[in-house]
Amino acid sequence: MSSLKTGFPVLLGALIVLLAGCASHAPAPVEQRDSGSPVTSGKLVVATVAGAGEVRPGFYMVKKGDTLYSISLDQGQNYRDIAAWNNLDDPNKIQVGQQLRVNPPEGATPVAVTKPIAGPAPVEARSLGAPSANTDTLKKEPKGGKQPYSEQAWAQAQKPESAPAPVAEKPAEKLADKPVPVAVAPAAVGDDAVDWTWPATGKVSAGFVEGSNKGVDIPGKAGDPVHAAAAGKVTLVSNALRGYGNLVVIKHNTSYLSVYAHNSKILVKEGQSVTKGQKIAEVGSSDTDAPKLHFEIRRQGKPVDPAKYLPAR
């Protein structure tokens, strides 16, 4: 009896421990994944953004420090065109990572369709031949008209009329043997046909350096004239580009534009057509340490050495 009393507490304790162990082993939570629904985890969002960052052909991804003016200059386009192609109401509102169309949309520029020039219609050659012998349709008259009768005249009238001399038939000219005149269109003006001149009279103090100086620097006195280096249209008048000060950009054709920086006074407006040598600004020191003109020539937005285009002096 005493052994039963002493064993019961031990048995009860073991039972309590066993129940506690069963209660602690709760089932592990199951993560439910639905392959058909979109996953919105942070990693997948980042991957989606990275995928969207692939720049499409004809587009440019905005980077930190970019402005629409700097983008248009680097792409060789008018900032107004880029704004229109991207439906930008405010050119100052662009975001880092945004992709902007920097080439004209397809169909914006009409393409001239040339057609072959048709040659002249072939000429049909017809032989005159001998006159028809149908006397019903031909009226004949005595050869000499009415003459007084005489034996000589009677003898002459009895002679048969001689047939007219056959007309020599000229062979028809073959079109292949004769060149067909073709209207020659005027030669298209090439990019290198831009008639350049120096924009200022001073001597160059700093030349073009790839990746460093994008143009040439021409020192001068404040107020000295700045001339258009070639005929074209003003596409930008601004002071929003850091390092350029009061700036003028002229577009000369589909490939070339010129840049005039650090002006003290600008005498032209955007959209204005200018002629070669026309005064467009005055030398100044805006955004620089001394009066000078910083001049650039850009081909399709890429700076090139102006010394290779300007005439020797």
Image (cartoon, grey):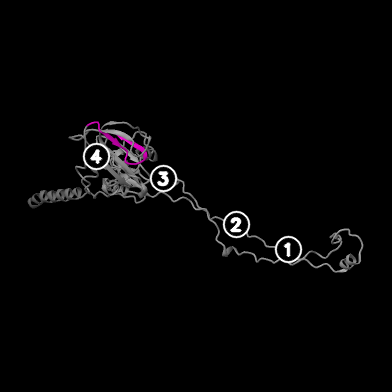
Q: Residues within 10 Å of mark 3 (few under 14, many from 20)?
A: few
Q: Which residue is mark 4?
A: 294
- Element assignment for label 2: loop
**Which residue shows up at 15% across the image and 48% down it?**
16
201 or 108, which is in the foreground?
A: 201
What segment is highlighted magenta in the picture? Answer: 222-239
Query: Crowding near pointer 2: few (<14 within 10 Å), some, many (20+)?
Result: few
On the picture, is 31 further left or further right than 103?
Answer: left
Residue carrying label 2: 120
Question: Which image quarter holds the C terminus?
Answer: top left
Are circles 4 and 2 on residues that touch, CB within 8 Å?
no
Residues marked 4 and 1 touching at CB (< 8 Å): no
* Alpha carbons under labels 1 and 2: distance apart: 24 Å
Disc 1 element: loop
Q: Is residue 276 left or right of residue 172?
A: left
The x and y percentages for residue 66 are 27, 40
| Residue named by callout 3 | 105
Front residue of 32/272: it is 272
Q: Earlier in the sequence, mark 4 or mark 2?
A: 2
Residue that numbered label 1 is attached to: 128
Q: Tell me if label 3 and label 4 are in contact, CB under 8 Å.
A: no
Examine the rendering and report whether any part of residue 127 can be seen.
Answer: yes
In the rendered picture of this protein, how many numbered marks are placed on residues?
4
Against 285, residue 115 (above or below) is below
Q: Taking 281 as reference, is 53 above or below it?
A: below
Amino acid type at mark 4 = His
Magenta span contains residue 53: no
Query: Mark 4 against mark 2, which lies toward the viewer?
Result: 2
Q: Alpha-carbon neighbours of circle 1 within 10 Å: few (<14), some, or many (≥20)?
A: few
User: Closer to the observer: label 1 or label 2?
Assistant: 1
